[in-house]
Image: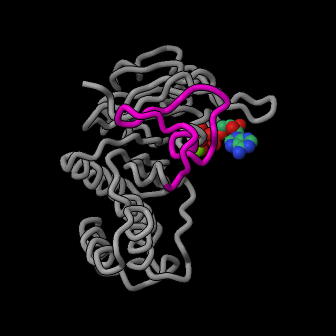
């Protein structure tokens, strides 16, 4: 079966810095693909390229058989790719509910009435029903991570890109987030999970790719990647030590 999302030989330069160098990967339908690698490896840049906020210097991104490189971010969102951001930036003056409603209205193109009911359902499904009428600053950091997820879900994605959505969570909260992600997978949403919490990303991913200085240095099943000497040297060694 053709992949849902395909990144082909993407290179992204910022002046002399090559943030991504010839990166290739595929996300299959129903799959959770993990991306790991040290700080500055290019993980967030890769998400920026896929979602259209940065144009790559070379290469292309294919979604559902169609080239999306060069499309505007809102078009890519409407086609069915959503992301969460490493640094959550909800609208601080709106409530949690309104933040999700806006994402449904603009990201999915729903009427306000339909967006409101959709937002209510999503908030319940991610466990934010009780805090829906508070502002994002009044809820816990773990709830803000769920809000970031809810805003992405409200746009109706087929492919969801999660950028360190478990950073700063306790182990109990990480377990709950993993439970939510597994539920989304069962509902047919495919995911790319960028994460430094190795146990979490290794546990949930079907496959892992490893980025280092913009290069893909490994790809495989979690246990294969964890045993790869190059990956241990570039990244895992310090963490397992
Ligand atoms: N818009 C930009 N302009 C210039 N340089 C950038 C830009 N975005 C990212 N970079 C640089 O590209 C490299 C890759 O950054 P990126 O944020 O993709 O790394 P990352 O793998 O997400 O790291 P982290 O794990 O710390 O989040 C870094 O050296 C970063 O400073
Ligand atoms: Mg990053």
Residue 172 within the segment the image draws in magenta: no
Residue 69 within the segment the image draws in magenta: yes
The answer to whether residue 212 of the structure is visible from this angle is no
**Front-lying residue, 89 or 139:** 89
Please tell me in which quadrant of the rendered image residue 153 appears.
Answer: bottom left
Left/right of residue 99 with respect to residue 202 in the rendered view: right
Q: Please identify the quadrant where the N terminus is shown.
A: top left
Left/right of residue 144 with respect to residue 223 in the rendered view: right
**Magenta stretch in the rendered image:** 48-74
Please give the name of the residue rendered at 32% of the width and 37% of the height, measured from the top-left corner.
32
Please tell me in which quadrant of the rendered image residue 127 appears.
Answer: bottom left
Left/right of residue 170 with respect to residue 90 in the rendered view: left
Residue extending furthest toward the left: 186
Residue extending furthest toward the bottom: 133
Please give the name of the residue rendered at 59% of the width and 21% of the height, measured from the top-left corner.
22
Residue extending furthest toward the top: 229
Please give the name of the residue rendered at 46% of the width and 34% of the height, measured from the top-left corner.
67
């Amino acid at each position: 079966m053709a992949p849902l999302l395909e990144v082909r030989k993407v290179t992204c330069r910022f002046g002399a810095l090559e943030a991504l160098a010839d990166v290739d990967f595929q996300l299959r339908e129903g799959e959770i693909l993990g991306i790991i690698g040290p700080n500055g490896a290019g993980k967030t840049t890769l998400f920026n390229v896929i979602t259209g906020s940065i144009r790559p210097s070379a290469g292309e991104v294919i979604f559902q058989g169609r080239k999306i490189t060069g499309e505007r971010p809102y078009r890519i969102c409407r086609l069915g790719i959503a992301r969460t951001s490493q640094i959550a930036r909800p609208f601080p003056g709106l409530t949690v509910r309104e933040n999700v409603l806006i994402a449904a209205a603009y990201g999915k193109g729903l009427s306000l009435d339909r967006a409101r009911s959709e937002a209510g359902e999503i908030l319940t499904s991610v466990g934010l029903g009780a805090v829906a009428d508070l502002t994002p600053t009044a809820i816990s950091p773990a709830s803000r991570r769920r809000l970031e997820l809810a805003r992405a879900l409200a746009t109706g994605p087929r492919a969801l890109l999660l950028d360190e959505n478990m950073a700063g969570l306790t182990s109990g909260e990480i377990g709950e987030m993993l439970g939510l992600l597994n539920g989304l997978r069962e509902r047919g949403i495919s995911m790319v999970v960028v994460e430094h919490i190795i146990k979490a990303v290794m546990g949930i991913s079907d496959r892992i790719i490893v980025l280092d200085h913009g290069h893909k240095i490994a790809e495989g099943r979690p246990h294969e990647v964890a045993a790869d000497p190059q990956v241990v040297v570039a990244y895992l060694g310090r963490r397992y030590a």
